[in-house]
Image: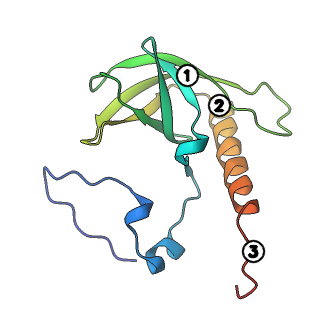
Amino acid sequence: MFWKKVKPGSEQLFNPDTLDTHDRQNLRETFRYVFEEHERITVRFLGKTVPIVDISAGGMAFINKGFSQYDADHIQLDLNIPGFLKSNIFSARVRILFISRIQVCHCIFENCTIEQYEMLHKYVLELQKKRLSNRPHDPAH
């Protein structure tokens, strides 16, 4: 797959809906889970409840509700990971790095432990497995 060079000052957003069929089939969504609108979970950030657009071990994106670039807060998520032997509560400091023109805050998790990263990887994997199991099976593939 070839990538277009991004011009300085332009804003490129990842939107899997804009990909053609060939690109969609070759897209690797191994590390990030993009929630369907009906399945989004929420988090409290700076006193406001916001829906999460996507999540990975490195960070998450959520709908902007009047926040600013570099705002930060401590968040907690109940990840509800089936079969996970430890606590499902993920707690970390989140910082907004970028706010897109469609008002999505793209954030990083700060100072996470290896155990926290492993928990997020497991959560994303379980979400992907669930999505794949709900897809209709195509016997041609």
Q: Residue furthest top?
A: 47
Q: Position of residue 107 (x, y in %)?
A: 41, 33
Say what amino acid the circle numbered 3 marks. Answer: His
Q: Position of residue 31 (x, y in %)?
A: 57, 52
Which-is-in-front pick, marks 3 and 1? Answer: 3
Say what amino acid the circle numbered 2 marks. Answer: Gln
Residue closer to the observer: 131 or 84: 131
Q: Which residue is mark 2?
A: 116
Q: Position of residue 16 (x, y in %)?
A: 44, 61
User: Mark 3 or mark 1, which has the lower sequence index?
Assistant: 1
The answer to whether residue 29 is above or below residue 98 is below
* Image quarter of the C terminus: bottom right
Residue closer to the observer: 111 or 6: 6
In the rendering, which numbered label is found on residue 137?
3
Q: Position of residue 79 (x, y in %)?
A: 69, 32
Colour approach in the figure = rainbow
Q: Is residue 71 left or right of residue 33?
A: left
Q: Which residue is mark 1?
A: 92
Q: CA distance from mark 3 to mark 1?
A: 38 Å
When asked about the image quadrant of residue 129, the answer is bottom right
Say what amino acid the circle numbered 1 marks. Answer: Ala
Q: Tell me, yes or no, whether the two marked residues, 3 and 1, touch with CB atoms within 8 Å.
A: no
Give the structural element (helix, strand or loop) at label 3.
Answer: loop
Q: CA distance from mark 1 to mark 2?
A: 9 Å
Q: Is residue 99 left or right of residue 110?
A: left
Q: Is residue 125 left or right of residue 61?
A: right
Give me the residue at 56% from left, 41% from top: 57
The answer to whether residue 112 is above or below residue 100 is above
